[in-house]
């Protein structure tokens, strides 16, 4: 009878412990990603902060009249998306360039209507295909950030010359890619 009394406690403990497994595993995966990224942990945090602050500032200052995304890598802020006019394009760039720790703002915004959901889904699919192509081409996936906008691939990262060439070639061979823009920092082996 004593065993049955502790059964609910044992079940509750097993449920709680199994719920912790994803946290432990997730924490380990995050540590592996930080350790294998070529940026320092501090720079990775700065890049995440740049993206968040830029998005908030764009929303605050320009509202919904622009669709702009910011991707930061090693304090270089890539701005992609669409705006209604040239003045808004310049305003977004000024906003992003003024974010703390931005070393360089690269403005790839275009003046045109916002793309359809289908077009944006296609960009997400192309990004996935490029990342898969990196594996086949032996490109260190965590050393290169891939952003796709209107079937244009943007590569940001810290890579060797050989890795940059392999990444570029792998991205160019993916069906649907119209252009590859390299914003890569070349490092020595």
Image (cartoon, grey):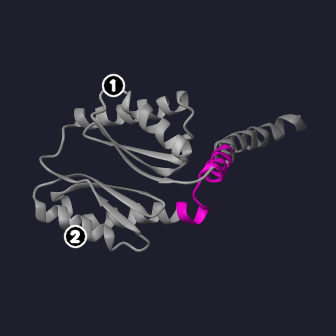
Mark 1: few/some/many CA within 10 Å (<14, 14-19, 20+): few
Q: Which residue is mark 2?
A: 61
179 above or below 182? above
Inspect this view and state whether residue 105 appears.
yes
Mark 2: few/some/many CA within 10 Å (<14, 14-19, 20+): few
The residue located at (65%, 43%) in the rendering is: 19
The picture quadrant where one finds residue 41 is: bottom right
62 with respect to 96 (left or right): left
Front residue of this view, candidates 125 and 188: 188
Query: Which range of residues does the magenta coloring cover?
Result: 25-44
Query: Judging from the image, what secondary structure is the residue with disc 2 in?
Result: helix
Q: Which residue is mark 1?
A: 175
21 above or below 59? above
The residue located at (48%, 51%) in the rendering is: 157
Residue 122 image offset from top left, x and y in percent: 29, 32
Which mark is nearer the camera, 1 or 2?
Answer: 1
The residue located at (25%, 65%) in the rendering is: 93
173 with respect to 150 (left or right): right
Whether pointer 1 and pointer 2 mark residues with C-beta atoms closer than 8 Å, the reply is no
The picture quadrant where one finds residue 50 is: bottom left
The residues bearing labels 1 and 2 have C-alpha atoms spaced at a distance of 37 Å
49 above or below 127? below
Inspect this view and state whether residue 128 appears.
no
Residue 51 image offset from top left, x and y in percent: 40, 61
């Amino acid at each position: 009878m004593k065993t049955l009394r502790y059964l609910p406690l044992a079940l509750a403990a097993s449920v709680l412990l199994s719920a912790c497994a994803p946290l432990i595993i997730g924490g380990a995966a995050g540590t592996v990603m930080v350790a294998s990224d070529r940026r320092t942990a501090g720079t990775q945090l700065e890049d995440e902060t740049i993206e968040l602050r830029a998005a908030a500032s764009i929303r605050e200052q320009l509202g919904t009249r622009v669709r702009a995304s910011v991707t930061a890598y090693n304090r270089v802020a890539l701005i992609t998306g669409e705006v209604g006019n040239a003045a808004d394009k310049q305003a977004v760039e000024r906003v992003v360039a003024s974010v703390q720790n931005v070393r360089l703002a690269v403005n790839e915004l275009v003046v045109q209507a916002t793309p359809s959901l289908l077009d944006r889904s296609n960009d997400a699919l192309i990004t996935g295909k490029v990342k898969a192509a990196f594996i086949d081409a032996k490109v260190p996936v965590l050393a290169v950030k891939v952003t796709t906008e209107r079937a244009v691939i943007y590569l940001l990262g810290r890579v060797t010359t050989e890795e940059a060439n392999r990444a570029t070639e792998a991205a160019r061979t993916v069906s649907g890619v119209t252009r590859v823009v390299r914003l890569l920092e070349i490092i020595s082996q």
